[in-house]
Each structure stands twice: as C-alpha cells, then as structure tokens.
C-alpha cells in the first residue's frame, strides 16, 4: 500500500483547534449531499437566498431630506411599517436612481439576537422586481417541493438582464444533477452553444456543458468527446469535471473505462486531475446514471490501493450509497498510518467504519484496535462543551 502524504494537518496542542475540527466534521455530516457540486464557479449565496432568509425586505430610494442615504418606500416582506435604513448610497447608484424612477434598491434585514442588520442585496428594475415578488410568494412552496425552485429559474438562463441571468444560473447550477438533466429546453441550443463559445465566462461553463449533454445533435456530442480527449492529452482541469460528467452521460461504460485507464490507473496523473474525474463519478453514482454505481465502486477500490490519501473523499460517496466496500482498506490504513490524516479525516473515516459495522459488515481481518490518541482527542473535544454546559447550568441557578 502506498505511503500517505500528510495534508492539512492540525496542531493537536490547542483545544480550540480540535473543537474547530469537530465542528467542521459535524458540518460535513449535516451538509446537503445531493446537490450538483461541479456547476458553480465558487460557493455563493443567491439573491433568492437573501430574500427568503430575511426577516424584512423593502424597496428603497434616496432620502430627499438626507442625500446619500436610503429611505424605505415599500415593504415586500415582514413588518409592514416602513423602517429606517442605516445604509450609505454610493454615487453611481444615486445617479442610476435619479435617472430612472422605476428602479429601487432592494434591502433585507436579518435579526440576530437583540440586534438586526440591513443589507443591500440588489438594484431592481420592473422585470427583476416581478421575479423578487414571485420568489417571496413561492418560498414556502419551494420548501415542500424543492424541485420546483430550479424549474422556476431555468427559463431565465441566458436572460439579457445579467442580474436575472446570474440569479438563474446560481439557482439552477446547484440543483441535483437529476434535476439538471430534465432541463433539456431550458435554453435554445443556439444560445447554449454561443455561451460555451464565449470564454469570458469560462468559469461558468459547467452548467451549460451538462445541458449540452442532453442534446441529440451528433455535432454537440462530438464536441463533448473532443473536449474530454483534449483535456486528457494536455492535463487540463478547468471544467474537466463537467466534460467528464457529460461524457459519462453519453457513453456510460465506455466513458468510465476511458477515465479508469487515462486517469485513475495512470501513475503520472496528479491528485488534482484525479479529483476532477472523481467529481464526475460522484455525480453519476449519486443521482445520474446510478446503474453504473457498481463499476464506480470497483474503480474506487482500485484507486484506494494506489492513493489511500483519497479515502476520505471516496468514503463520502460510499457512505451515501450505503456501500461498505472500502471498510477493510480504511481499517488497515487507520491501523498502520493513522497519523497521516488530519483530525477531520480521521473522524470521518471512523464514522464510515462504524456505519459499516452497524450494517452487518464483518470485522476487518486486521483486527484493528482504536488508537488511544483518538480517545484522548475525543475527551479534549468534549471539554469546551462541558464547561459551557456547566456555566449555563450555574447561570440558571
């Protein structure tokens, strides 16, 4: 078994660092697992998120009695009394408002404890304002039926208004892949091709690559195959995850065999190159061509032998899929090379083993025992919580 290269190792000498590690691990367990993770250029919050999460939403314009400040004109959400808004109005926005009486600054208020904070989230025009009002009216409906949220925004992809197009992109791009596959008619194919030809938006191309994979046109399919082959030849990683996902959509087993040979079994491939292919495998194994999952799991098993440092990544998928195929390998690595993993990864791998054991997975052949260091770390992690609890109890008394 290959030697694990330590990465992101944390200093175990401080309780605060360990506590942070535990929090990160807890957030990993609680995070949504089925959203498409390859479509966004960076994690971001959409305008819809701001509106839905706010306690109050208002439309504002410049205060005529106090230049460079805002005054609420209409309440869209929350308490119906027009509030005071402590926000500065910049010169550019001031000129924009002065030249168009139909434009407004959209502001949200979020309360935290005894305090509240106003945030400017958009500059509206009549078209965007219509969408904002629909978002607020549909918010509760989307909570019960999340699939309707991405379907609502899909027709706005490629809208001439960049603020509307960006909102739609952020909303659709983070939908589960199974939903994205259904949006065949989200954009006219000519517009889709034109967007992919515009390299000014190269970091935003992933979503449109996945939509292109739904095209029946042989020219579009050949474009996907050519992009995959070119990226493999020149070790390009930008949008390779999306092109790989699209290729698997088209060619299934043939595509998996290509990636197994050209990436996962190639000793000259970097970890970064392998990770982008794993992202495509993960998307399909989770909610794409799930019938390919057995092949993907076997690919993971072979990859783990060569790159055990990837076990934390691989076991995230396997835990979602309720597959314990790597339990023996995880147990062996934690027994022989546990010090090579950081705290979060160690906790994650042990969680995978506990789930495997609970599912009836036989005890691993190595008969691994829990490292005493793990018990010590666990005790240290509980100290801050214990002190906080005792302090709260004392305060109540």
Image (cartoon, helix red, strand yellow):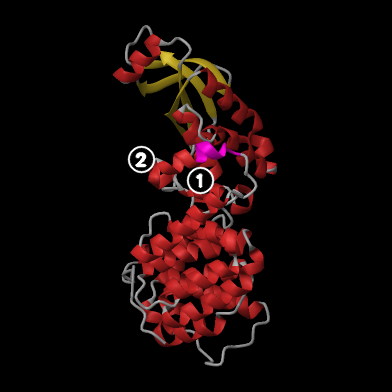
User: Magenta stretch?
Assistant: 186-192
Viewer-proximal residue among 204 and 108 = 204
Left or right, 16 with respect to 127, comes to: left
- Residue at 47% in and 68% down: 313
Left or right, 274 with respect to 207, comes to: left
Q: Can residue 389 be seen in this view?
A: no
- Residue at 59% in and 34% down: 155
> Gap between marks 2 and 1, in whole Å?
14 Å
Q: Mark 2 points at which residue?
A: 200
Q: In this view, does 129 lie above or below 169?
A: above
Label 2 Cα neighbours within 10 Å, binned few <14 / some 14-19 / many ≥20:
few
Viewer-proximal residue among 329 and 385 = 329
Q: Which mark is residue 227?
A: none
Q: Name the residue under label 1.
A: 208
Residue 208 shown in magenta: no
The picture places residue 2, in percent across and down from the top left corner, at 38, 84
Left or right, 299 with respect to 264, comes to: right
Viewer-proximal residue among 46 and 279 = 279
Q: Is residue 338 visible?
A: yes
């Amino acid at each position: 078994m290959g030697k694990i290269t330590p990465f992101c190792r944390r200093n175990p000498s401080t309780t605060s660092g360990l506590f942070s590690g535990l929090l990160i691990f807890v957030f990993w367990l609680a995070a949504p697992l089925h959203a498409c993770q390859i479509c966004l250029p960076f994690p971001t919050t959409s305008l819809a998120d701001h509106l839905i999460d706010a306690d109050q939403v208002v439309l504002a314009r410049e205060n005529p009695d106090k230049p460079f400040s805002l005054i609420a004109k209409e309440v869209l959400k929350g308490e119906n009394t027009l509030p005071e808004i402590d926000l500065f109005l910049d010169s550019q926005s001031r000129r924009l408002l002065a030249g168009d009486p139909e434009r407004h600054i959209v502001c949200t208020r979020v309360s935290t404890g005894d305090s509240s904070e106003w945030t400017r989230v958009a500059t509206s025009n009549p078209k965007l304002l219509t969408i904002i009002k629909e978002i607020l009216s549909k918010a509760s409906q989307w909570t019960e039926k999340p699939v309707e949220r991405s379907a609502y925004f899909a027709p706005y992809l490629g809208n001439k208004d960049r603020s509307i197009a960006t909102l739609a992109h952020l909303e659709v791009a983070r939908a589960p892949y199974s939903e994205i596959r259904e949006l065949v008619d989200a954009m006219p194919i000519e517009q889709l091709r034109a967007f992919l030809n515009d390299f000014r938006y190269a970091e935003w191309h992933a979503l449109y690559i996945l939509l292109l994979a739904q095209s029946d046109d042989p020219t579009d399919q050949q474009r996907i195959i050519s992009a995959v082959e070119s990226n493999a030849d020149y070790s390009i990683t930008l949008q390779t995850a999306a092109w790989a996902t699209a290729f698997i959509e088209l060619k299934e087993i043939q595509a998996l065999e290509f990636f197994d040979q050209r990436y996962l079994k190639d000793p000259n491939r970097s970890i970064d190159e392998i990770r982008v292919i794993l992202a495509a495998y993960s998307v399909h194994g989770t909610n794409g061509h799930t019938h390919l999952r057995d092949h993907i799991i076997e690919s993971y098993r072979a990859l783990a032998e060569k790159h055990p440092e990837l076990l934390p990544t691989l076991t995230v998928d396997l835990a979602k899929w309720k597959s314990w195929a790597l339990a023996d390998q995880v147990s062996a690595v934690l027994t022989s090379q546990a010090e090579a993993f950081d705290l979060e990864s160690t906790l994650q791998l042990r969680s995978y083993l506990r789930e495997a054991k609970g599912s009836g997975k036989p005890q691993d052949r190595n008969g691994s025992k829990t490292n005493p260091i793990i018990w010590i770390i666990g005790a240290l992690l509980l100290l801050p919580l214990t002190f906080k609890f005792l302090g709260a109890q004392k305060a109540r008394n």
